[in-house]
Image (cartoon, rainbow, N blue to C red):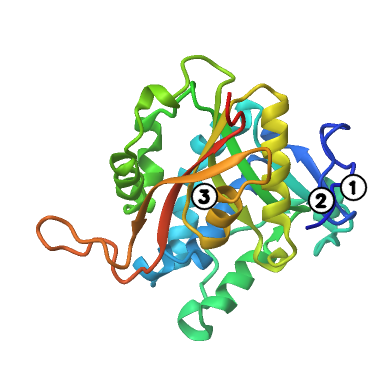
Amino acid sequence: MPQNTNPKTPSPNNPSSLPPHFEIRKLEPKHSAWATAIVIHSNVYHSPIWPRLYPSHLTARAHKGLAAAPYLIDHQIASGHSYGVFDTTYTYKRPESAATGGALYWDETEPSVQETSGLEAESKRMSDAMDFPLVSVALSYDGFNSLDMVAMEPLLAVLPHFGPIYHILAELDARDPASWQPTAEGQVLFRNATSTRREYEGQGIMGGLARWLMREAKAKGFRGIQIECFNDAVTHVWSKAEEPFEGKVVSSLDTGTWVEEDGTRSFAPAEQVCAKVYVDLEPGA
């Protein structure tokens, strides 16, 4: 396991295990469009669920997601509990990006190459238009300050299976709500959106940021963290939290085998076990 020796974090007493050229920073409103693009790009093109459910016209969906997601992203950035990993050695693709510290160049009038060159080529075309040093995000908000579901409707319309999966995971959670739900601010952190840019995957960024955030949340006084995971690697990191914390899968849904009462396979052909994980930051308390 990598050692926590990288001091480039918001908390001097909480270094990270990330390689030295990465820096963890608290996200600010000026990062909203970048964070939104990372989340949308990762989900639309490379999720084990969404490209299987919506295989065509992915770029049109990505542009709709970019327009629909800011409420969710901004709510979490405004909470003060959302963080990003920045590459301090990032090389800008365009001189105008370097002049401003980064920019997003998605243009919905540009034609997609998915139909002629394939998904990976179109993913790269869109990724190349993300010319900024933010490479990974871990978005969170205080669970006591819940989301406005009316404001969430545009995003839920872009990914129509998103809401039902969350609903099923909530229904399958057999815990007594009083045993874990927050009754005031500063008790339970809700994680919502873990994404790393495609070209930075495989470098341990997601895991390093997640473990850092667990320690940071504990230092801030939170007693627990809840996260819904739609990726095996994310589920593993959070459900196998490092000591002294304890992670547990409290409900799960296999999209490949789920059948409704009327026999409908609502999530076919996706084959992914989605999990709701709770991390106890005060085990035994």
Label placed on residue 5: 1
Residue type for callout 3: Leu
* Spatial CA span between label 3 and label 2: 31 Å
Residue type for callout 1: Thr
Number of marks drawn: 3
Do we see residue 104 in this rendering? no
Residue 29 versus residue 271: which sits nearer the camera?
Answer: 271
In the displayed structure, 201 sits above or below 132; it is below
Label placed on residue 166: none
Mark 3 crowd level (few <14, some 14–19, many ≥20, 10 Å Cα):
many
Q: Earlier in the sequence, mark 3 or mark 2?
A: 2
In the displayed structure, 193 sits above or below 221; it is below
Pick the quarter of the image with the N terminus. bottom right
Mark 2 crowd level (few <14, some 14–19, many ≥20, 10 Å Cα):
many
* Spatial CA span between label 3 and label 1: 35 Å
Q: Mark 2 = which residue?
A: 17
Q: Earlier in the sequence, mark 3 or mark 1?
A: 1
Q: Mark 3 = which residue?
A: 66
Q: Which secondary structure, mark 2? A: loop
Is 152 left or right of 72, judged from the image as shown?
A: left
Q: Which secondary structure, mark 1? A: loop
Residue at 49 percent of width and 43 percent of height: 69
Residue at 43 percent of width and 68 percent of height: 51
Q: Are marks 2 and 1 in contact (CB under 8 Å)?
A: yes
